[in-house]
Image (tube, grey):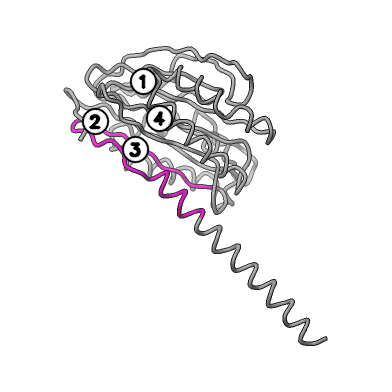
Amino acid sequence: MFCKVINHDQQNLDSYLTLKREIQLARKIQRKLLNGEKPILINSQVSGFSIPASMIGGDYFDFYPLSDGKVRIIIGDVMGKGIPAAMLMILTRGAFRSAAEVTEGPGETLTSMNKAIFKDLRTLSSFVTVFCADWDPNTGSLVYANAGHYMPVLVRGNTETFELPDLKGVMLGGLPDQVYQEKEIRLLEGDTLFFYTDGIVEAQNCHGEMFQIERLHETLMQNAHKTASELETIVIDTLTNFTEGLPQKDDITMVILKVGTGKDQQR
């Protein structure tokens, strides 16, 4: 009997260690996918950063260089957290990468993605909010489409801060035949465009207060002159100070586009 108890405990320990290794491997794979090759621009900067609330998360961002010199940018948030959300994040990434190769704009990309993963999302009773944009570094044109996600914040070079003109769209997995519309805006030299997920504005302090969009606007406006990587650190530090070290409840993800001078060329 004693030996059986020892063997049972050893089996439990082995199972725990195996699961821990697999979760760590999944986290490593996810981090590699989120930190893949990014377009390097001569005059402008584009960067992305994500902190999962648990070992692995369901937030997603990506960059896809297009043949005409544009860059397709996407940010998304899968309903839920942990391993289930991470699995759906990988599904979303695959749908985006496949759609980006054959679609002409962000609206078509979201339409194609929804068609590709709608049944899977419905089967799992889940959905994904996504914002997708094509940025032309040579003209400053930003064409975008939205699937139920937060609108990015635009900081003009003169420190005027506002969200992009609103464009509504149903989240991926919401309707089977949704067609996503597009809007266009011109980005100017010195502009900063900040894409984000709800883990930033919904972060709470010990009093139950949320960080909210107003604090984000203020932080971006005060630091718009910083580089993309510096701005990432400032936003995270500001959130950490606000939450006073409380455990992170949701994934935190951001993408920062800073428009430089002249024309850019991808390398």
Residue 112 at x, y percent in the picture: 50, 22
**Around disc 2, counting alpha carbons within 10 Å, would you say few (fewer than 14), some (14 to 19), or many (20 or more)?**
many
Question: Does label 3 or label 1 sit earlier along the sequence?
Answer: 3
In which quadrant of the rendered image does the C terminus lie? top left
- The residue under label 1 is 160
Q: Are marks 4 and 3 in contact (CB under 8 Å)?
A: no
> Which residue is depicted at the point 28% across and 33% down?
225
Residue 47's label in the rendered image is: 3
Q: Are marks 3 and 1 in contact (CB under 8 Å)?
A: no
Q: Are marks 4 and 1 in contact (CB under 8 Å)?
A: no
Indicate whether 112 appears above or below 255. Answer: above
The region drawn magenta spans 26-52
Q: Are marks 3 and 2 in contact (CB under 8 Å)?
A: no
Left or right of 213, for residue 249: right
Q: Nearer the viewer, mark 2 or mark 1?
A: 2
> Which residue is depicted at the point 50% across and 28% down?
214
- Give the Cα separation between the discs numbered 2 and 1: 19 Å
In which quadrant of the rendered image does the N terminus lie? bottom right
The amino acid type of the residue labelled 2 equals Ser
- Give the Cα separation between the discs numbered 4 and 1: 13 Å
- The residue under label 4 is 194
The amino acid type of the residue labelled 3 equals Ser
Q: Residue furthest right?
A: 1
